[in-house]
Amino acid sequence: MQFGIFTVGDVTADPTTGRTPTEHERIMAMVAIAQKAEEVGLDVFATGEHHNPPFVPSSPTTMLGFIAARTSTLLLSTATTLITTNDPVKIAEDYAMLQHLAEGRVDLMMGRGNTGPVYPWFGQDIRQGINLAVENYALLRRLWREEVVDWEGQFRTPLQGFTSTPRPLDDVPPFVWHGSIRSPEIAEQAAYYGDGFFANHIFWPKEHFMRLIEFYRERFAHYGHGTAEQAIVGLGGQVFIRKNSQDAVREFRPYFDNAPVYGHGPSLEDFTDQTPLSVGSPQEIIDKTLTFRQHFGDYQRQLFLMDHAGLPLKTVLEQLDLLGEEVVPVLRRELEAMRPASVPAAPTHASLLAAKIAAERSAGSADAETLVP
Amino acid sequence: MTRLMVVSAGLSQPSSTRLLGERLADATRSSIEAGGGTVAVEVVDLRDLAHDVVNNVLTGFPAPALARVLEQIAAAQALIAVTPIFNASYSGLFKSFFDVLTPDSLRGKPVLIGATGGSQRHSLALEHAVRPLFSYLRAVVVPTSVYAASSDWGTADGSSALAERIDRAGAELADLVTRMAPTAATGPVDPFANPPSFLDLLGR
């Protein structure tokens, strides 16, 4: 089971002081948060990709490359990479390069973006969103798996004799997750390829996502990648932790009340009842997070949103200390104890490389056997 | 058994808008029962759900009490929707409620529309504002809409024009519901019921 954090990279005023960080401060805060994540024993740091204010992370591989140089075990990921508006050739190149620099500590989560206008900024049309995601990803897979690619599609200049460089590290492409909050097509895409499926379920009630994940699991089995229970599932989470529950609620309330997504709407108490948000003591966070497994089955990756809504860096770092020291170790122990041996962990570069070597060996020995008279 | 929902956007208590909705429901019930059918009526005051409606606009999902009402509407065979007329149109609460309704909930569903107002001069708001809203939602709106101004509720000369309109509209709704095959109102589409084949998406 992997635990980590994902960040939107929003520049938001701190509602308790009225102060808005500069873009530079926010970017360097994201780096400090990533380093802290490794220090407190988390496994994954994932950055969003946005091309409009008030968000800063428009260039994820630049940031992740910088973080890669300052960390040694942290797995670097995205939440999400825009498979619709980025050129799949550039994604193939950028993330293969990052994979080399990070010694394989890289995977990606594909998404379609959260704002309509981003499509025309990059010469695309939102009405083609699903088709772009399907065609671009199919090309990306080939670029990472085939040395020389001839390709022609609907949305991009044809390729003749094209080789994407550098080749993926050890000829093992990065593992890919697909993120979606409502589209069966994207769950279907993840299932078809045997890729991971990530449901960022933090802003809505669980029932909606239970159906989506159940569908992904069914289709994963349908396409022969394993049983439904063996499908690779990731979930979002959103927490605010203090030793005492009342302190957590008191401190987080002004950030909740003014948060960009749900602020000025339901009360903190109602939203906590209705969504995965948990605000309270470490034990309360643990109890609520453990319910995710009951609703969605054994899963492989849990990412928490920790640094949004104008929370100052100091607070976020304190939150990560509590998450890493008091919450995640318990979750790790409990969830691992409950996970059947047949349910795999999330693929990593090391596990994918080992699987590739084993497959080549067995193919090689099969060849050798056929040579024996 | 016909399940009939009444949605009232009336704000005062007691509310003449709710009263109109109940009278329309009574007329519909009498007409269906005269034909040998039975009716279960459920009345919802949007006032009680006002905060939930706004929260749904902001968060994109309904709180439990609102979710129950949205499910009831999707499951009902007919709807009576009544609103006060504010500034020459439906009230903001009425519109916001139908803005958060589950898409396709009203597709093919018989609907009777009614409105109240201080002056008879706004009666056509039903035709230029309320009826197009339900046409957009692909509901089947009965021909008679019922507008009740303050003066309609009781005049010195004892005119029964409002009662006659209510009876006519109720009979039209009853007639439509009775004639409609139970499966005709299709309701919300389950996106997982007929998922796309990925090979089709790939164009192979």
Image (cartoon, rainbow, N blue to C red):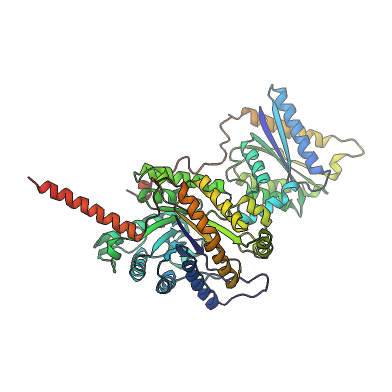
**Relative depth, front residue between A43 and A62:** A43
Residue A83 in sight in this render: no
Residue situated furthest left in the rendering:
A373
Quarter of the view holding residue B26: top right
**Relative depth, front residue between A311 and A357:** A357
Q: The C terminus of chain A lies in which quarter of the figure?
A: top left
Count of marks placed on residues: 0
Quarter of the view holding residue B147: top right
Q: Going 26% across and 60% down the picture, which residue do you hit?
A: A146
Residue A212 in sight in this render: yes
A333 relative to B185 in the view: left or right: left
Q: Going 29% across and 69% down the picture, which residue do you hit?
A: A166
A166 relative to A331 in the view: left or right: left
Q: Going 49% across and 44% down the picture, which residue do you hit?
A: B191
**Relative depth, front residue between B152 and A159:** A159
Quarter of the view holding residue A282: bottom right
Residue situated furthest top in the rendering:
B36
Question: Compared to A261, does B150 lie above or below?
Answer: above
Q: Position of residue A238 (x, y in %)?
A: 57, 58
Q: The N terminus of chain A lies in which quarter of the figure?
A: bottom left
Q: Position of residue A370 (x, y in %)?
A: 12, 46
Q: Position of residue A321 (x, y in %)?
A: 55, 66
B23 relative to A198 in the view: left or right: right
